[in-house]
Image: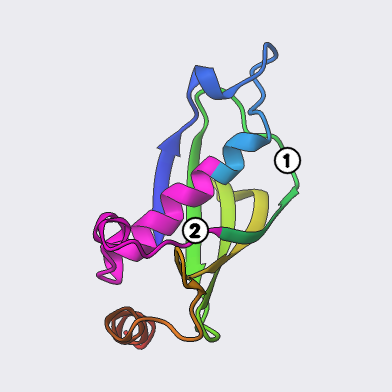
Amino acid sequence: MESELAVRFSECDPMGVVHHANYFVWFEVGRLAVARAAGIDVRGMAKERVFMPVLHCECRFRESARFDDTILVRTALLPPRAARLEFVYEVMRLPGHVPLASGRTVHAVIVPGRGMLLSLPAEMKQRIEEFLNQ
């Protein structure tokens, strides 16, 4: 899944370089795009009190993004293990697909009061499998 974004002034330091924390915001943009494409209703999950907190996140920086760059966030969902979802990301500058950063996040699927689930909810699992098999 690809998401194209323009680097905003508010995401940069006084030198016009993107602050590192914003890459994780961009990862979330990609993650939500994948969820939508897979038919996962993140807002509906929250209403049903099913959440996906981050267990692990990492980002490897190669080159700086700068104010007014056009960037592409490429996001992939890996096949799930139990009730864990893992996403991988590539951030590139356009034009030319210049690599800026890569990363990954790992999420647990939990229900407050019950803790981490042992397996994905059936409907979510089915939608993810259909999405990954496209």
Give x and y (percent) for residue 17.
Answer: 67, 24
Mark 2 lies on a secondary structure that is strand
Quarter of the figure that contains the C terminus: bottom left
Q: Residue at x 26, y 63 (%)?
A: 41
Identify the amino acid type marked 1: Glu
Q: Judge from the rendering whether residue 101 lies leftward or rightward of residue 38; answer left or right.
A: right
Is residue 66 at least partly visible in the picture? yes
Is residue 93 at least partly visible in the picture? no
Q: Judge from the rendering whether residue 44 lies leftward or rightward of residue 19; answer left or right.
A: left
User: Is the magenta region chiefly helix, strand or loop?
Assistant: helix
- Residue matched to label 2: 74
Q: Residue at x 53, y 86 (%)?
A: 82
Identify the amino acid type marked 2: Arg
Residue 95 magenta: no
In the rendered view, tell whether residue 115 sits above or below residue 15: below
Residue 50 magenta: yes
Give x and y (percent) for residue 111.
Answer: 42, 68
Say which label, 1 or 2, has the lower sequence index: 1
In the rendered view, tell whether residue 83 sits above or below residue 64: below
Quarter of the figure that contains the N terminus: bottom left
- Residue matched to label 1: 63
Boundaries of the magenta span: 25-53
Give x and y (percent) for residue 120.
Answer: 41, 82
Towards the viewer: 114 or 34: 114
Q: CA distance from mark 1 to mark 2?
A: 16 Å
